[in-house]
Image (tube, rainbow, N blue to C red):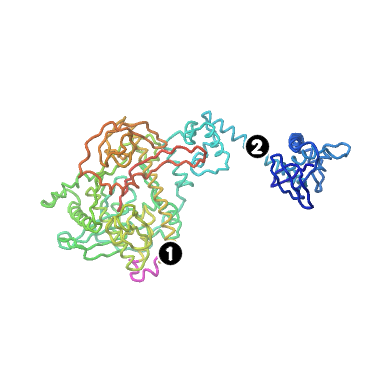
Amino acid sequence: MFVLFEEAGKFLAGRILSEADSSLQVELDSGKRVKVKAVNALLKFEKPSPAELVAAGQKLSQDIELELAWEFASDDEFGFADLARDYFSADGKPATQEQQVAALFRLFEAPHYFRRAGKGRFKKAPAEILQLALAAIEKKKQVALQITAWAEELAQGECPAPIRDQLYKILFKPDKNSAEYKAVVEASRNTHTAPLDLLQKAGAITSAYQFHWKRFLFENFPKGTGFPALQAPSHKEKLPLANVRAFSIDDSATTEIDDALSVQGLGTGTVTLGIHIAAPGLAVLPGSPIDNVGRSRLSTVYMPGYKITMLPDEVVQNYTLQAGRNCPAVSLYVTLDEATLEVRGTDTRIEQVPIESNLRHDVLDSTFTEAFFESAQTTPPPADVAWANEMVFLHQLAKHLKAQREIARGKPENFNRPDYNFRLDNPSGQEPIGNEVVSITTRHRGAPLDLIVAEAMILANSTWGQWLAELGVPGIYRSQASMAPGVKVRMGTKSLPHAGLGVKSYAWSTSPLRRYTDLVNQWQIIACAKNGPTAALVAPFKPKDAELFSIISGFDAAYSAYNGFQSGIERYWTLKYLQQHGITELTATSFKDNLVRADELPLVLPAAGAQGLPRGAGVRVRLGEIDEITLDVNGTVIERLDVVADADAVTAEELDEEDEETLASGPILIAVDMSEPATDAAGMATGVVSSAS
């Protein structure tokens, strides 16, 4: 005697060895013996063999039309033998064993037509639910056909419009249940081609620049870069007018002029340095609509030839330190001994500051050189050079402040590598399209005008950070526990030393038009300036305020993403520069592992033959093909040059400090999950970000 039974959703058949009231001992064709509950035994039979009956039932089950079976089935609960009799027997006689098994298999595999009501028992689905289920099945079938059709198009080098529209979502933030994503995965597997290469060959990516730009917008500005229609607020309080002549020092492309300087008392023995910071915090209040815009962006995004500002242009124009205007500002006045440059005292004021000049360092770098300042130590500066006396004093002070910081940090700051400036031939100032002519120029790090501004800003940020701490008012600080390798700069709400800068406290406060952390700190500084010892009671943010931690977390993520994009897009323009100028070889310096750094361009690349070279070794490299999508270019060392002089070499420790910035753009990461992952190519570039700005 044989038995057909159900076990864990599967149908099995075998020979009955013994039988009790509640169970059976059954031997399967494989020889395995199992204990079967009596309730799970569905059909007992003597012939044919179990394997023959199961095979015959499976074959016959496919001849059962589900629509017709559903019509034949009783509206009440029924067994599989009942359906077999009604479907196969015209005279009402019991169905054969083969027919019963066929009905059982067919009923079991069609849950949208028949619901299971117990072991071997079923109930047909209501008509309305059946129609919904059939519609869903048909839709799924059509989607599967669509996926196959799209995959075939991709394999043939054509990109369907729906996939083109979902390009960035498919690659970087995919919905793995979407038909577009599944089509790319299927085509990628069928053609053994990485998703990015597949889509590129299919014409989904028509512009490398637009690929990088739209990917960044997709990830960081999914709602676009436009601002909502908001009225730019103005401060209501009447501010005193400062008795100073202030000037700013920025690049010619700068429109968000956050800071200006003034010098009073030259020649009197006591000099007052004024550090004047634009004060949008007087009008843009926490929780206001404009504040919500700033908090959603957290920083201005910079790239060659274009930028996305943190605040609407109307707000920027109201508070930028434009020459010829009296501008609201938060001013730090530092009283100094003119001979020793010792700080005698500081004072913070909220006032209107007359801005007399907006100086541009790219115009004046050739005037205010190291030679100019060396000459000024023995000879009065030329009378026809505007601001010459103030610049001479500020440069002397900047060198003094830097030397003091270097004592605190334990070693000098070395500026052995240049900064790079990118200029696009884009007179309209509109969003670049990616094929503009690019020029790349160098500026020596620590150039006199840069040093003046950097040291003034470090002085302001460290002074205000310490002041906030003394008054018990929380702020957003940047700190570094030590300069040991791997110890990173952290952001937090506690006033802690910044070992890298050599200061006891450091709170970004000098760029409130373009960094949200600075705007937050400005609100706190304004509260201190107005309320003094009681500022902690009225400041917008209180100690241990959860909002501050939330802002820090959001800013860290956004600032990292923005800097990564800037580094990546600068690498794009560097590669474009190589193409436009037909550069196929360049001199470089061994960097780390098999990487070399170009001597005259902001470019790091892997070079065959560089592995094992000492750091600082000079080489000549022949460039390989450039991939503008992956930002990849390889090289081959073709000549070993003399090792660079020790005085010009960057030490291993300094290289370690800059590794993270240098490799900021990172690889293009593809989110498409396949058994054969896409090959990621690293894109590397040096960032140009002032540590003090």
Q: Of 421 and 682, which appears nearest the observer?
A: 682
Judged from this view, the residue extending furthest toward the left is: 378
Q: In the image, is residue 588 above or below residue 480? A: above
Judged from this view, the residue extending furthest toward the top is: 156
Is residue 536 within the magenta segment? yes
Badge 2 local density, few (<14 within 10 Å), some, or many (20+)? few
Query: Is 435 on the left or on the right of 170, as rendered?
Result: left
Q: Which x, y percent locates residue 3? A: 77, 43
Could you tell me if residue 313 is visible in this image?
no
Q: Of 321 and 493, which appears nearest the observer?
A: 493
Residue bounds of the magenta highlight = 528-539
Question: Of helix, strand and loop, which mostly describes the magenta segment?
Answer: helix
Secondary element at tag 1: loop
Q: Which residue was labeled with disc 1? A: 545
Q: Which x, y percent locates residue 171? A: 49, 40
Badge 1 local density, few (<14 within 10 Å), some, or many (20+)? few
Q: Which x, y percent locates residue 320? A: 33, 53
Is residue 204 within the magenta segment? no
Indicate the quadrant where residue 114 lies.
Answer: top right
Which numbered dot is residue 141? 2
Q: In the image, is residue 516 above or below residue 527? A: above
Question: Residue sitting at 74 percent across and 42 percent down?
Answer: 14
Nearest to the eye among marks 1 and 2: give it.
Answer: 2
Question: Residue sitting at 34 percent across and 71 percent down?
Answer: 533
Secondary element at tag 2: helix
Instruction: Report the amino acid beneath label 1.
Output: Asp
Q: Do the residues labelled 1 and 2 touch (CB within 8 Å)?
A: no
Q: Which x, y percent locates residue 203? A: 48, 31
Instruction: Report the amino acid beneath label 2.
Output: Lys
Q: Of 680 and 369, which appears nearest the observer?
A: 680
Indicate the quadrant where residue 401 lies.
Answer: bottom left
